[in-house]
Image (cartoon, coloured by chain):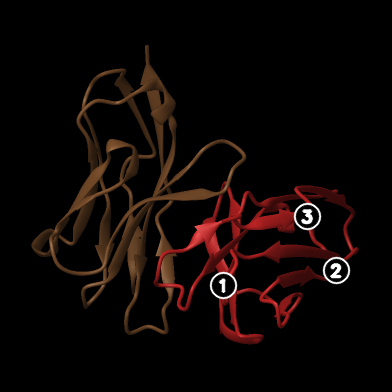
Chain colours: A red, B brown
């Protein structure tokens, strides 16, 4: 069974631009969660999607948004990028709930210049 | 407020030595408990998890962890480390009655001496 895939793996943007990251969960998994990982803040929960609906959201500004498609693939979008948005963005999938076992993708490394 | 504490930012052990990584949490109920490992530039891999039942949990790669309710701890152990165990280890708790919120600790970086 294929694991969680994330594209692109690396991305360089400039301040003010927007970016879209993609995540394909493990086949059959309906829950997709997004996390931001930085050296200073560690791993922080962004949001979770389940059956195309945002089920939970972390404490991030409205510039961070996401969506999930009917095939469970998910995208997250960050508008008006700031330097502080430079991070590793991790996607995780689970069958039903975040508190079940989550399987993480390799992440997308975003650098904002 | 709920929190997860991994008190050791870095730990260095010799190859073949035993290992214990500490994790303490603050939460009013029994949470779900996880340990993940992250190799450089990679995502997180689940080592083991505790949901209920036996408080000594066996995981992959020879790791085990013990849930101690009285100490609000979930320490990770391995009897003999290998050079390939060098990585960052994250403890996480899932809050059963907080809308499935998951909180991660800041991580412990494990260094292995040859």
Q: Which residue is mark 2?
A: A80
The answer for which chain carries disc 2 is A
Look at mark 1 in the image and give the residue it sits on. Answer: A28
| Chain containing the residue with disc 3 | A
Query: Residue, x 90% and y 63% (percent of image)?
Result: A17
Q: Position of residue A63 (x, y in %)?
A: 76, 75
The chain ID associated with circle 1 is: A
Instruction: Please state which of residues B43 and B90 is positioned toward the viewer in this rendering.
Output: B43
Percent x, y for residue A69?
Answer: 73, 80
Q: CA distance from mark 3 to mark 2?
A: 10 Å
Q: Residues within 10 Å of mark 1 (few under 14, many from 20)?
A: few
Residue A51 lies left or right of residue A110; in this view the side is: left
| Mark 3 and mark 2 on one chain | yes
Pick whichever, B94 or B62, lies toward us: B62
Dot 3 corresponds to which residue? A83
Q: Nearer the viewer, residue A76 or B109?
A: A76
Label 2 Cα crowd, 10 Å radius (few <14 / some 14-19 / many 20+): few
Disc on the earlier residue, 3 or 1: 1
Residue at the extreme front: A1
Task: Classify mark 1: helix, strand or loop.
Answer: loop
Q: Residue at x 79, y 60 (%)?
A: A82
* Most distant residue in the left direction: B70
Callout 2: SS: loop
Label 3: element kind: helix
Q: Nearer the viewer, mark 3 or mark 1?
A: 1
């Amino acid at each position: 069974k294929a694991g969680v895939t994330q594209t692109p793996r690396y991305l360089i943007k400039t301040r003010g631009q927007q970016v879209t990251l993609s995540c394909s969960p493990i086949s059959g998994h309906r829950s997709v969660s997004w996390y931001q990982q930085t050296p200073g803040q560690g791993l922080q929960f962004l949001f979770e999607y389940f059956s195309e609906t945002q089920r939970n959201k972390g404490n991030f500004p409205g510039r961070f948004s996401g969506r999930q498609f009917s095939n469970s693939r998910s995208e997250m979008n960050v508008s008006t990028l700031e330097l502080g948005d430079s991070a590793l963005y991790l996607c995780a999938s689970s069958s039903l709930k975040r508190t079940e076992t989550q399987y993480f993708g390799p992440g997308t490394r975003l650098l904002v210049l | 407020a709920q929190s997860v504490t991994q008190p050791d930012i870095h730990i260095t052990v010799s190859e073949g030595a035993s290992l214990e990584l500490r994790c303490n949490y603050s939460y009013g109920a029994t949470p779900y408990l996880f340990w993940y490992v992250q190799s450089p530039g990679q995502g997180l891999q689940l080592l083991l998890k505790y949901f209920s039942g036996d408080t000594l949990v066996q995981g992959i790669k020879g790791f085990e962890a013990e849930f101690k309710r009285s100490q609000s701890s979930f320490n990770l152990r391995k009897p003999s480390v290998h050079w390939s165990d060098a990585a960052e280890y994250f403890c996480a708790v899932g809050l059963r009655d907080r809308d499935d919120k998951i909180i991660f600790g800041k991580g412990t970086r494990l260094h292995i001496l040859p």
